[in-house]
């Protein structure tokens, strides 16, 4: 199998895949914000949550259900900022994944990635990283929602964590996006081989 990538292009393809995987895994994991409620650990993502309070009518008390899951609907996400963050970050992850898979195909298919296609792919990666970065920047605006305040000792507010702390998934998502924007975009410029000129 012939490759349409240069040596820098092969590094770009695998690094693009790693960045996309890191961003996507971080996005789908509900460990962006970590806290506790009723002495049980609670975590939030943009559209998922682990551990939530439920009223137990038989014992006449509120108990914590220790399960992870998505919110019942898009409107059930605690704040408008988190809904926007979910859409923007999801789009960014989709773009990074699209470019990464195309780049990996370029390792096996000849004449798939030219210099021009590589530069366009780098631009798409930059846009994807920018969208994810915007989502990560929007996320703290939702810390003033009632659900988050209950988990963070009623001390959280926009850009104030209260008793909570940021989890690994937030860093994983942002780190993957930053590496895609800074390193992969640059490598993409040198990824494709010069196209052969065919006389017609």
Image: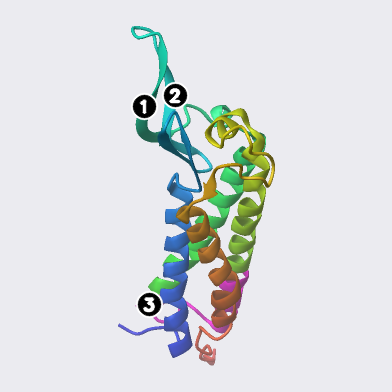
Q: What's the mark number on residue 53?
A: 2
Q: Check residue 176 for magenta coloring.
A: no
Across and down, in percent, residue 61 comes to: 41, 13
Over which residues does the magenta segment extend? 106-123
Dot in front, 3 or 2: 2
Write down the residue under mark 3. 109
Q: Are marks 2 and 1 in contact (CB under 8 Å)?
A: yes
Q: Check residue 122 for magenta coloring.
A: yes
Establish if 14 lies above or below 174. below
Instruction: Calculate the distance from the C-alpha at mark 2 to the C-alpha at mark 1.
Output: 6 Å
Establish if 100 lies above or below 5. above
Q: Are marks 3 and 2 in contact (CB under 8 Å)?
A: no
Instruction: Calculate the distance from the C-alpha at mark 3 to the C-alpha at mark 2.
Output: 52 Å
Location of the C terminus (image quadrant): bottom right
Across and down, in percent, residue 145 comes to: 63, 32
Looking at the image, the residue that sits furthest to the left is 1
User: Looking at the image, which is closer to me, 37 or 68?
Assistant: 37
Instruction: Calculate the distance from the C-alpha at mark 1 to the C-alpha at mark 3.
Output: 50 Å
Label 3: state its secondary structure.
loop
User: Looking at the image, which is closer to me, 66 or 128?
Assistant: 66
Q: What's the mark number on residue 65?
A: 1
């Amino acid at each position: 199998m012939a490759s349409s990538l240069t040596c820098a292009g092969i590094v770009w393809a695998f690094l693009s895949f790693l960045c996309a995987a890191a961003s996507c895994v971080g996005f789908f994991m509900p460990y962006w914000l970590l806290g506790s409620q009723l002495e049980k650990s609670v975590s939030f993502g943009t559209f998922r949550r682990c551990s939530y309070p439920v009223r137990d009518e038989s014992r006449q008390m509120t108990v914590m259900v220790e399960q992870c899951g998505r919110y019942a609907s898009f409107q059930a996400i605690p704040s408008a900022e988190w809904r926007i963050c979910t859409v923007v970050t999801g789009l960014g992850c989709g773009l990074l994944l699209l470019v990464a898979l195309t780049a990996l195909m370029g390792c096996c298919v000849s004449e798939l990635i030219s210099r021009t296609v590589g530069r366009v792919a780098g631009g798409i990666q930059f846009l994807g990283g920018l969208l994810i970065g915007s989502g990560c920047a929007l996320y703290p605006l939702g810390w003033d929602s009632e659900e988050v305040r209950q988990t963070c000792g009623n001390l959280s507010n926009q850009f104030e964590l209260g008793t909570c702390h940021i989890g690994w998934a937030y860093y994983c998502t942002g780190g993957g996006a930053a590496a895609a924007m800074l390193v992969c975009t640059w490598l993409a410029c040198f990824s494709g081989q010069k196209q052969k000129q065919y006389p017609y």
